Image (spheres, grey):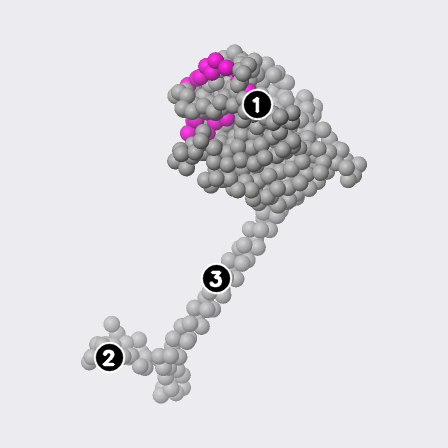
Amino acid sequence: MADILSGKPRFNGDKNAPIRKIVQKDSEDSNDIYTEEEIRQKVRQHRITQLKVVAAVVFVIALLVLLVIYILDNRTYSSYKLTKSISREDVETSDYISYGDGYLRCSSDGISYFTLDGTAVWNQTFSMKKPQVKICDSFIAVGDVNGNMIYLFDKSGYISEVNTSLTISQVEVAKDGLVVAVLEDNNANYINMYDKSGEKIYSVKTTLFGDGYPFDVSITDDGTKLMAAYIYVSGEEIKNNIVFYNFSEVGKNETERVVGGYDFDSTIVGDVQFLTDTLAVAVSENSISLYKVKETPKLLKKISIDEEIQRIFYSDKYIGIVTDNTDSSDLYKLVVYNTSGNEICETTFDTNYDTIQFDDSSIVLNNDSSLCVMNMKGKVLANISFDSTISDVVCLGKKGKYVIINRNYIQTIKLK
C-alpha cells in the first residue's frame, strides 16, 4: 500500500515497526506533524461530531413523526364519503362483527363470512335460539345460549360442532381452536373444554352450595389459563370470588388445576377478562382489579369506582367503563385505563349509545342514528348523524373507516 503523502511504499523495512508520524500538521511547516495521540483525539472528535449530527437528524425525524401522530390523532371530521354500498338481503336481527379482512353476519338461522366488498367467503346454516359469537385470532365459536349446540369455524369455514346435551350459558374460544363452554342443569354447573375436533378434554363441576355458580369466565388466547367469577352460598349469605385455573404443566399437580383465587365477599363480580396471556381483569360493582398471571395470580392494582358501572369494554391495551355521572349535567362519564391501571382518559357525554368499542387508538360510540368517534384524550373527532336507522357499526382498524349496517344497506364509509 502506498504512503498517503509520498506515494512510496509504506513499509521499507520492518513491517512490524510502529507508525509514529504519518500526516503533516501544517502545510506551511512541514516539520510540524501529528503524533499518534493527537490523531486518535481528532478521530474521536470526528466521531463525536458525526454522532451529534446523526442524533440531531434522529431528533428532528422523531419530532416530525410525533407531530404527524398528533395531527392525525386530533384531526376532526364533519361528514363522510360513501365508498361502497351493498343491498342488504338478510333479516334485521342479524349481527355484524369485524373479522379478518371483512366481517361476519350472524343470526339465529346461520353465520356467513364476507370480504369488505360484500363477497361471501363461506356460509353455514343452523337453528339457534340466541347465538353467541366469540372470536380469537382466526377461530370463531358460535354457541346457542339456552340451547345445546356449539359450532367452530375459521377463515376457511366449518371445522366441527359439539352437542353439549346440557344448557349453554356462555362460550369462549382460544387461538388454537380450543372451546370453553359454561353449562348448567338442575343440580350443577360445568365448565367444559373441547379441542378443535369437538372432543371434551376437561370438565370442572360446580354447585351453588359448593364452589358456586360460574357467573362469567375468560380463557387466555393460548388456551392455558382460565379465570371464573363465582357466586356461591355460604351459610345464609351469598358471596363472590374469582378462581384461576392453569391447564399447562404448572397446574397439572394442583387440585382441579386451581392455582389461585380472590374473595370479593358480598360484592358481585360481573365481568372477568384476560387482556393478554398474563394480564387479567375482574370488574365488580365498585372496583376494577388487575392481576398478573404468569403461573399463579398476583393482584397488581385495585381501582375503586364510586359510581354505578353501566358498561365495560376492552381491547388488549385498554379498559373502558361508562358510569353514571354525578359531577356535571351530562348523564354519563367515560373513563379509560391502560393495562397498568392508570387513567388516561375521562370525559362526559349526554347521549345514550347502544354500542361502545375500541378501534385501535380511538373510541367508537353509536346508537341507531349517530356515530361518535373520540381519541384517547376524550376529544370528539366526529359526530355524524344518519338518515337511516343504524343496526351495527363494524370497525375496520383504520381510523375514519367503518362499515355501517342499516335496514337496507351495508355501507363502507370514510370520514372526511
For the question of whether residue 53 can be seen, the reply is yes
Q: Camera-side residue: 170 or 40? A: 170
- Quadrant into which the N terminus falls: bottom left
Q: Residues within 10 Å of mark 1 (few under 14, many from 20)?
A: some
Residue at 48% over, 18% down: 150
User: Mark 3 touching mark 1, by CB under 8 A?
Assistant: no
User: Would residue 403 be found to the left or right of residue 346 on screen?
Assistant: left
Q: Residues within 10 Å of mark 3 (few under 14, many from 20)?
A: few
For this orientation, the residue located farthest to the front is 235
Q: Which label's residue is closer to the chain start, 3 or 2?
A: 2
For this orientation, the residue located farthest to the right is 329
Residue at 66% over, 40% down: 304
Residue 54, numbered circle: 3
Q: Camera-side residue: 347 or 150? A: 150
The CA distance from mark 3 to mark 1 is: 68 Å
Q: Main secondary structure of the magenta part?
A: strand
At label 1, which amino acid type do we have?
Answer: Phe
At label 3, which amino acid type do we have?
Answer: Val
Residue 133 sits above or below residue 260 on the image: above
Measured from the top left, where is residue 54 in percent x and y? 48, 62
The CA distance from mark 1 to mark 2 is: 91 Å
Q: Residues within 10 Å of mark 2 (few under 14, many from 20)?
A: few
Which residue position is annotated with label 2? 17
Residue at 54% over, 40% down: 291
| Badge 2 element | loop
| Badge 3 element | helix
**Foreground tag (3 vs 2):** 2
At label 2, which amino acid type do we have?
Answer: Ala
Q: Magenta segment, which residues?
A: 159-180
Residue 209, numbered circle: 1
Question: Residue 50 lies in magenta, yes or no?
Answer: no
